Amino acid sequence: MKIVLLGYMASGKSTIGVILGKKLNIQFIDLDTFIEEKEQLSISEIFKQKGEIYFRKKEGEYLSELLDSENDLIISLGGGTPCYGNNMNKIQELSTSFYLNASINTIFERLKDEKTQRPLVTNIGEHNLKEYIAKHLFERNEFYKKATNSIDINDKSAFQIIEEIVDLL
């Protein structure tokens, strides 16, 4: 069984994935961490040294590697992963996916305090952050909505979200 968690940055994919993995006794893999280990570079270094096209190509290859493996896995994706190449089709075909659907306000509240840890938003002023999030969500929503399941994560604890996922499985 492959379970894929997708959604915008700060929607809780990694946090939910770790706890869900322990609850279901299934290995959890964060795709970005997997890429960093395989490439021996951080995501931001890959972007700087090799460019976004290289990164997106490798991201698709490593996603396929995980989805094609024989192991049961819970995989959390980068926010943009479903939007490139044939990634969403592979996700639909080879996994049960969950869109962790967070509102603009929820994402904003989480991101404004951790901007230094998020390379994509480090240089965006707080006054422009909501607009940036809204624009990205609008662009990515058509991909996110193709997930097998959609879970509204606003005002819910990680444990409530995990219970919803388990119930849907």
Image: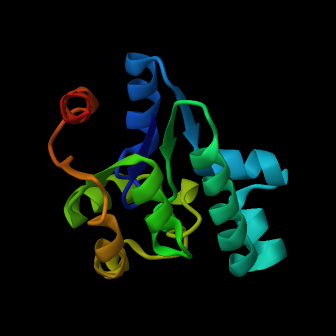
In the image: residue 62, left or right of residue 126: right
- The scheme the figure's colours follow is rainbow
In the image: residue 130, left or right of residue 160: right
Q: Position of residue 89 (x, y in %)?
A: 45, 66
Asked which quadrant contains residue 102, the reply is: bottom left
Q: Position of residue 86 (x, y in %)?
A: 53, 72
In the image: residue 107, left or right of residue 71: left
In the image: residue 157, left or right of residue 12: left
- In percent of the image, x 28 and y 77: which residue is there? 134
Instruction: Check the image and report above or below for 56 versus 111.
Output: below
Instruction: Check the image and report above or below for 159 versus 55.
Output: above
Mark yes or no: residue 22 visible: yes
Q: Position of residue 81 (x, y in %)?
A: 52, 65
Mark yes or no: residue 137 visible: no
42, 5: nearer the viewer: 5
13, 82: nearer the viewer: 82
